[in-house]
Amino acid sequence: MKKHNFSAGPCILPQEVMKKASEAIIELDGIGLSLIEISHRSKEFVEIMESARSLALELLGLEGKGYKALYLQGGASLEFLMVAYNLLENKAGYINTGTWSSKAIKEAKLLGDIVEIASSKDKNFNYIPKGFVVPNELDFLHLTSNNTIFGTQIKEFPTTSVPLVCDMSSDIFSRQLDFSKFDLIYAGAQKNMGPAGTTLVVVKEDLLGEVTRQIPSMLDYQVHISKDSMFNTPAVFAVYVSMLTLQWLKDLGGIAAIEEINDKKANLIYSEIDLNPLFTGYAKKEDRSSMNATFNLTDNALKETFDNMWKDAGISGLNGHRSVGGYRASMYNALPLDSVGVLVDIMSDLERKG
């Protein structure tokens, strides 16, 4: 039985992407060689990399606007450090909305003065801070757009003259935004793009080259730009699957089309959470994530019954993070609306049995 995959990541991918990727492992496009045994300098893979970079800029509406797309390694965790290496000269501001923001702050502090402009730590990160003032003298302001663990998502980004840097690892390509507001975006592939192993970085090129420190080559965005994401051997399979996923998204109608589907999924589950007295949402309603719905039972005596029900229905990956407990339904782009329907039906059945 095919599972309903609510895993927070690595995540569900479109079936047609999985099929084509599996075929390429045996042989890539009839060339007589596997994707994972050809040279990354070969014509075939250079075209894959160029397509992956181009599709990212196209879908984000950033073509011809001075941005470069890179596929790097090390995940968002390495980007926490790379951002600071490349952009932090004097002082940077961070909005702390959860575990990943906290980790980004920790790494940046190794290289300069970090100001925590606002934080929701006082409520265990169940809301997004608002009404904060962004100082003009910052080198950049760093935000995390979506918080997988706590189920919160920034709905309105600050307007400021300070360069905006955003970790979009868990909601990249899921909703329409004016992406030109951001000077640097980074995202691990393993939520909405592909398998773990590569990280998309989209950076405005004129932002770079301003720091006075010497940057190690592997951490220097300008080095990676000059080598078209091929300074070292890239994560060939992860880049290929990311390209396939972005092409799938384009064929679907782009971000506008997937946002409509994502809204339906989010509305379906949050309506059940709010109407069903056996469940309560974790995140503040105005800050709820369309990607990760976090919720708890109102009576833990029902936990064993509920757990057996959703497992018997073929649902996987629903347990919440230890920081929050309860449950987390991750609804990334490729998760079908029908899967959310299965979960909601089980939640309704639990109420009827109760």
Image (cartoon, rainbow, N blue to C red):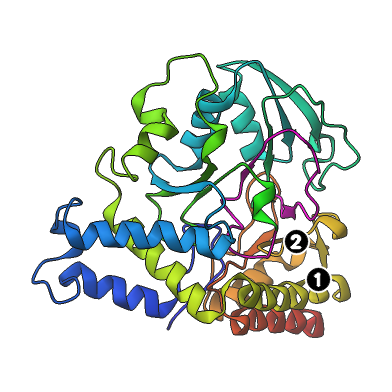
Residue drawn at point x = 57 percent, y = 56 percent: 62
Query: Residue 295 sits in which quadrant?
Result: bottom right
**Between residues 181 and 106, which one lies in front from this camera angle?**
181
Residue drawn at point x = 48 percent, y = 59 percent: 56
Q: Main secondary structure of the magenta part?
A: loop
**Between residues 304 and 16, which one lies in front from this camera angle?**
16
Q: Position of residue 343 (x, y in %)?
A: 66, 78
Between marks 2 and 1, how big is the CA–CA gap? Answer: 7 Å
Residue 147 in view = no
Depicted 270 relative to depicted 9: above or below: below
Picture quarter with the N terminus: bottom left
Crowd class of label 2 (few under 14; some 14 to 19; many from 20; radius 10 Å):
many
Verify whether residue 162 appears in magenta.
yes
Depicted 216 relative to depicted 270: above or below: above
Task: Report whether 66 appears left or right of 154.
Answer: left
Depicted 348 relative to depicted 28: above or below: below
**Between residues 87 and 321, which one lies in front from this camera angle?**
87
Which residue in the protein does label 1 denote? 273
Task: Report whether 41 appears left or right of 283.
Answer: left
Verify whether residue 76 appears in magenta.
no
Q: Secondary structure at mark 1?
A: helix
Q: Position of residue 232 (x, y in %)?
A: 26, 38
| Circle 2: residue type | Phe
Residue 85 in view = yes
Depicted 176 relative to depicted 234: above or below: below
Which residue in the protein does label 2 denote? 295
Residue drawn at point x = 47 percent, y = 47 percent: 68
The first of marks 2 and 1 along the sequence is 1
Tag 2 and tag 1, C-beta contact below 8 Å: yes
Q: Magenta segment range? A: 149-177
